[in-house]
Image (tube, coloured by chain):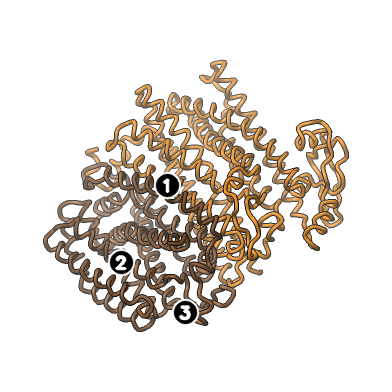
Chain colours: A brown, B orange
Amino acid sequence: MSLNELWFLLIAVLFVGFFFLEGFDFGVGMETQILAKNDTERRVLINSIGPFWDANEVWLITGAGAMFAAFPHWYATLFSGFYIPFVFALLALIARGVAFEFRGKRDSKTWQKTWDVCIFFGSFLPPFLLAVVFASFIKGLPIDGDMQMYAGFFDIVNAYTVVAGITVVLLCLVHGLMFTTLRTLGDLQERARKLAQKLLIPLAALLVAFVIMTYNMTDIFDKRGTLLWIVVALGVVAYLLSGYFMTKKKDGYAFGMTGAVMALSVASIFIGLFPRVMISSLDQAFNLTITNAASGHYSLKVMTIVALTLLPFVLGYQIWSYFIFHKRVHEKEHLEY
Amino acid sequence: MDTVILSRIQFASTTIFHYFFVPVSIGLALLIAIMETMYVRKGNEEYKRMAQFWGKLFLINFAVGVVTGILQEFQFGMNWSDYSRFVGDVFGAPLAIEALLAFFLESTFIGIWIFGWDKVSKRIHLLSIWLVAFGTMLSAFWILAANSFMQHPVGFQINNGRAEMNDIFALITNGQLLVEFPHTVLAAYATGAFLVTGISAYKLLKKQDVPFFRKSFEIAAIVGIISSFGVAVAGHAQAQYLVETQPMKMAASEALWGESGDPAPWTIFANIDTDNKTNSNEIQVPYLLSFLSYSKFSGEVKGMNELQAEYEQKYGPGDYIPPVKTTFWSFRIMVAAGSLMIALGVYAIYLMWRKKMDKPNTWFMRFMFWGLLLPPIANTSGWIMTEIGRQPWTVFGLMTTEDSVSPNITSGQVLFSVISFTAIYAILGAVMIGLFIKVIKKGPYAMDNEHGESHDPYNKED
């Protein structure tokens, strides 16, 4: 495997990790308005992701940083090309991040409600917008010979990308609900599981629609047919198993399976892209690839050594932190937020 | 307005805002780590309360620092895509390493610190805050490695029309970094320290929780004086490096148009006329600029006119003189604020040494309270001098700001983002100050029953 391929893989892994991990805390953020009946439940929900959400978000920051370092042209074309969507995603992430910290700091209903609105939109908009961005990756974008992307509104927002956005949001919600069943008890846990089960059917419809649209509107099945059909098949299996485990109340396995559906969906985008990183709708020759968008060999080598040295530690202490906070959040304990 | 100007406004305002919070995080993390270490070693609950009280302010501040930092990473690509293309190979690496090495560490262990008081052992809990403090410092190191490259590019070659890294060790032993990192990190420690002494001074003036705040004051004053002195020493080293590598910035920060003469005097005040390239009403201290530049009382410093001619020969026609007034005055404001910090710190240490902290002068405590504004003033003006003084370059000698901007964004888009980010930052700033005041007013002992007053009926059982 060349270093360019390795870095494409690492970036894919970082984004898969981001959607798997932050996916559930986005879901829990949405639940605060959908599932929670009162302020105590809302606080239990927020506390259940309290120790984790910040580190989960670092997966996105590291993903973008790795893009910058390994494929500067990818980073430059992507972020300048999707200027406005990223402004909204940033505003949402900013509001959400401080909302967790601020909401419990004053004893006023209006105050808490304001920040709760920020938490909801901050948990809903970023996955939606990122999914829109990723879907338009494989659909192709108007990128010229200078690697500059001049996209109009409908290049970015169209039926295909919106379906992708809604699918991912719903997937985050179901994944978050399964996380809630793992971190809470009693009525809240029960309701989370029931809602997750209820959402499985609409989610299935969206996923099928997304696969059909992808098959018709992009070239990724032509390029990577066999591998992608395997991913789709695995996705179907994971999906069915998640439903099965939910009915058997095996929450841990069900959470693993909703996460697997998420991971496979994100992975399929990267598989379909490879070895391209951005697809030009103007001319195949203008595609950004893992070769023409990449940093030099020396830079990639340095980054590889650094990443391979650090990753075991990073993964180690992150897993350890999940172990420390494996106990369920109880409404009778000290709630930080 | 065009996208360059708007993007510059956005970058400047968001970076300055972000940098109100970063030094406070770095500084408070260290102080809290010291306080908690004393708690673990001495077993005195008062120190634990100190860590928790200052920890509350730390967390409010940290949250704003983190969320505004995400924008910092994204806007290189959003607004400065041609810059990102040109230097991504070199500049991206420290950013990615910063995320991998520092952000994961900070974010994971801050989670353990906040939620782990009764879930992990005392020692692990203490280790967490030290790792957070260490992480914030690592983060500073790598982001400054990237910034130092912009000030003084090293460890690269130009290939295929862009800068490509060829020596990572040159990048992390960049002379610029070796002076900028201690200067910046010590300034951050001073920022945390003066915040704690300032708030403590306020509470001592009000005679609230006196033993608690006197102890906090003393710990922070020691950190404050050591770091303020260190900042000055490191700043001196940085000025000398500046003369060597970016003489134009040095000349601009002195408003020095022609030759300085030998020995060179330091200008305290000048009425600068940038159109006619002259100054009037100058007040000068003899020898001082020579000393600043070379650590001896002789030596000439080049002026802007001469440097402009040199640069035109080297880089082609153009205006290589940065905004002189801004550079000149920001430098002076930084030095003045830093000197005041040292003066206040020395007097505070004198009081402690003579055991007069029981009855410090009220005027002094008032000064100490307002003194909490000095580090942010010094930090901000220091950065303005560093970044404005580098203009017209983004990467010194290699790429101009004009050429760095994204060609595919419209001024309408950038105007929209400038307005949105300014608005959300203004709200965040106001809310944060409000919350700070609230926490400070409540004091360290209000925490015991704080959760009792929420709407949550279960919390009273705590």
**Residue picked out by circle 2:** A264
Q: Quadrant of the N terminus of chain B?
A: bottom right
Q: Are marks 2 and 1 in contact (CB under 8 Å)?
A: no
Q: Residue flagged by tag 2: what amino acid is it?
A: Leu
Q: Residue furthest bottom?
A: A216
To which residue does mark 1 refer?
A310
Image quadrant for the C terminus of chain B?
top left
Q: In the picture, residue B43 is in which quadrant?
A: top left
Of the two numbered discs 2 and 1 on the same chain, state the one appearing first in sequence: 2
Query: Tag on residue A155?
Result: 3
**Compared to A188, does B297 lie above or below?**
above
- Extreme left residue here? A248
Q: Is residue A29 above or below residue B154?
A: below
- Discs 2, 3 touching: Cβ within 8 Å: no
Per the image, label 2 sits on a secondary structure element best described as helix
| Most foreground residue, A304 or A74 | A304
Note whether B106 is above or below A156 in the view shown.
Answer: above
Q: Secondary structure at mark 1?
A: helix
Task: Answer with left or right where residue A88 lies relative to residue A175.
Answer: right
Q: Which image quarter: residue B339?
A: top right
Q: Nearer the viewer, mark 2 or mark 3?
A: 2
Q: Position of residue A21 (x, y in %)?
A: 33, 57
How many angstroms separate mark 2 from mark 3 (CA)? 25 Å
> Which residue: 82% across, 42% down?
B301
Same chain for the residues under marks 2 and 3 in the image: yes
Q: CA distance from mark 1 to mark 3?
A: 39 Å
Q: Nearer the viewer, residue A38 or A98?
A: A98
Label 2 environment density (alpha carbons within 10 Å; few <14, some 14–19, many ≥20): many
Q: Amino acid at mark 3?
A: Asp
Q: Are dots 1 and 3 in contact, CB under 8 Å? A: no
Q: Distance from label 2 to label 1 (Cα)?
A: 25 Å
Q: What is the quadrant of residue A159 in the picture?
A: bottom left
